Amino acid sequence: MPLVRGLKGRLTAFLAVLGPGFITAMVDNDAGGIFTYSEAGARWGYLPLWTLLPITLLLIVNQEMCARMGAVTGKGLSDLIREEFGLRMTVIVMGLVLAVNFANIAANFAGIAGAMELLPVSRHVSVPLGALLVWGLVIKGTYQSVEKVFLVASAFYVAYVVSAILVGPDWGAALSSSVRPVLIPELPYLAVLVGLVGTSVAPWMQFYLQAAIVEKGIDSTQYRATRVEVISGCVVMALVAFFIIVACAGAIWEHGPRPIESAAEAAEALRPLGGSAYALFAGGLLCASLFAASILPLSTAYTVCEGLGLESGVDHDFDEAPSFYWLYTLLIVLGAGVVLVPGFPIVPMILLSQVLNGLLLPVVMVIILLLINRRELMHEWTNGPLYNALAWIAVAVMAALAVSLAALTLLPRA
Amino acid sequence: MESTRTEPPRLVYLTELTGMRLIGPRGARIGRVREVAVFPRDHPRRVSRFLFGPGRTRFSVRWDQVLSIRQNGIRLSGESFTPYYGDDYHLLLTKDLLDQQIIDVNGRKVVRVNDIALRVVRNGAAQLWVHEVGVGLQGAFRRLTEGLLPNAAIRAIQGRLPRNSIPWEACNIVEPDPQRRLRLLISLDRLSGLHPADLADIVEELGSEEREAVFESLAEEFAAETLEEVRPAVRSAILRSLDRGRAADILEEMDPAEAAAVLANLGERERAGIVGDMESEPAGEVEELLEYEKDTAAGMMGARFLARPSSATCGEIVRWLRGRDSLLKRLTHVFLLDAGGRLKATVPFGRLLVAVPDEAAISLAYRETVRVGLEADSGEVVELFDKYNLHTLPVVDGDGRLQGAITADDVIAALSHETERGL
């Protein structure tokens, strides 16, 4: 009896802590992720694979710092920004987060549209329905139970692993490209790089993860277990990205490199799986988009209201937290609405949202680094010198990438 | 000290005050205010020091060196200023309060400080007293436009925005450092006036150090009642943050079943440490309850119940109950046991009240004595409550001996927990 109890207790403890890091990593592979990785593989083949190692490291560093801050302070990231940098800075950061997250929300509604058009269902039907579903999930308070369905649906990514194996890619090239950095000073390539960073290490993730850690009541004594969970979530995310890129490289790029312009083109990557490839891709993309479309508006409304000191959280009702619910509703309505604008270019917009993530990331990271090194806040949990050096180098590299992207976009071509 | 005039108080906002000019007796410009300090040991709301200086250097102007306070500047009576190196006994309004969370005791919630309004009090020379704390749009607007728009324009526009402010006397600063709390005379006494459930909601919004501060300073019994209402995840975090002896003291005050539920979420070693620090009687009860699985009847039940021999009369029971009013808040039934401690019958309090004192209690019992075994799962318990419209359900061991009782409260808690976890 005590043995069974002990086992069960340990399992429960592990499952309880399994939540935040893993969920964040799974949501990370949203419509934006699928299309960005597909574009990378379809257009550039195995070439961009080398970015995955540094990206994973970058993701781990970012997520780990936020998880640590949440566990040590018991406060959300926007709470800390407000307390340490004041209201004006908070408003600026929240404005940027709001704009970039909005692009991500729209991207996921675009993902819903793209997935359903493969079936084919008009976006004028699928997007409003999706928006209503997402909105209702939270308002009715049933989100928690649906979350598990989404998590299980994440198993869809296994399809890419199978597909990547079946398509028979050039594994040698894939592996050597994974460790050989290649930089091409061309706008589309740099945009893909920034997009890859932006989709994998999206700024909303840091806010979301830290809030989830606080919500779970994880404190510094439990932090070790959480760190393991956060890191393994990041690794799984990177593996998924690897197989999507390889599958696309094998199935599309080897037959002629081209950019991805529609969901149908992205679905080509699953062609080795046979006749059901389209349906499988549509189902997977739909789930990933719905999952992210549920979490992003919620996380954004929460982040912004928290920073501004407005009542927030699904524990309150509409009357208690009007700003929270209005913002949440608006994000969904506008995010879904944008997709319905006639002639809305679905895939380019999805890719653009990921580039915006990449541009905002260095800003958020600087803030995180300044916060986590405050002794009065983190006590003995501040970064070590090596950790800091690594993180600041990452900020510099990302800022350089962002600047060169901006320069290439703005400067007239010779 | 309060002025008797009825006109509205002349307010100066902290956003206006920082950057305000300090003017010497002969009109010399001395500098601009960077920070103001209240010295609570001296006066609870009067600004005691005005700090100014370039870069990180600070000089301090004492409150009694001030002649007048106007929008265009603060006029001083002297020119001797002392360097300021920080003082733990001073509450710095910008550093310690702006953008921080405070507890609004009247509104029973946690709010964030946007701006602080100070009142000019003329008492011979001019003084500044902290008046209220702005937590609404008005304060936010002032903060965002401060320095970008002229003060007069800010004042003109802000009138159209909702003010939303909290009087200073309702503000509770949650200072995590106990020493500093003592020095600043910050007391969390007023929190004890809140309902435990309200305070629990407040605590959930705070950061971990602030939570710890609240639970360190509350009376044990009140702390226990509050802790029972806090979300399970946060509850164990609080318990872990507390000193072991303090945690044990608070748990002793809790219903053993609740205490066991809190402890069940802790690690083996932490749990043993805390239980070891508890007095032996509650510790024993809690340990026994910890043995049971959470989602069984035994895991749901409370170990405290009212039981009398089955031969007792109503009068005897009522007299016996009088000595146990601490248990009466939750329990609504008396269980009748035979000599071996086996459950015979359940009697509701209501019937005892209206009965003749020497009537045998057993004659008032429910016709059917619904009971459940220790190992029954929670679904079965819920079903029994539903089917028989129960308020309480006795739990018995294999030999029929009474071990505890589940109340409607426990069932509701279990159900709402289940909904929260998403079934």
Image (cartoon, rainbow, N blue to C red):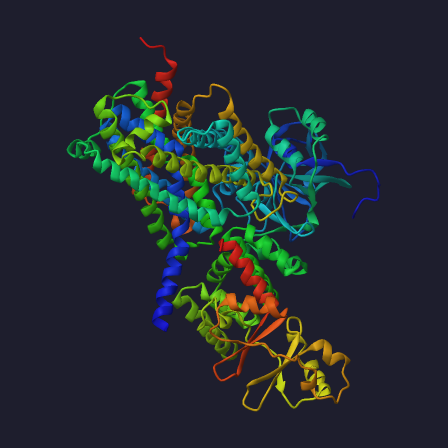
Work out whether residue B318 or residue A342 is closer to the camera in this orientation and state it: A342
Instruction: Say whether residue A75 is left or right of residue B348.
Output: left
Judge by depth and name the residue closer to the eye, A285 or B248.
A285
Q: Residue at x 56, y 62 (%)?
A: B413
Check the image and report above or below for B122 versus B23: below
User: Which residue is the extreme one toward the top?
Assistant: A414
- Residue A379: give x, y in percent of width and height: 42, 50
Point 56% across, 77% down: residue: B371
- In this view, the residue farthest toward the left is A172
Give the answer, above or below, for where B37 lies relative to A9: above
Q: Mark yes or no: residue A370 visible.
A: no
The image quarter in which residue B357 lies: bottom right
Residue B280 shows in the view: yes
Q: Position of residue A28 (x, y in %)?
A: 39, 38
The quadrant of the rendering that contains the N terminus of chain A is: bottom left
Give the x, y percent position of residue B332.
66, 74
Tell me: residue B54, above or below residue B99. Answer: above
Q: In which quadrant is the C terminus of chain A drawn?
A: top left
Q: Position of residue A106 (x, y in %)?
A: 47, 29
Q: Nearer the viewer, residue A54 or B423?
A: B423
Q: Is residue A112 above or below residue B341?
A: above
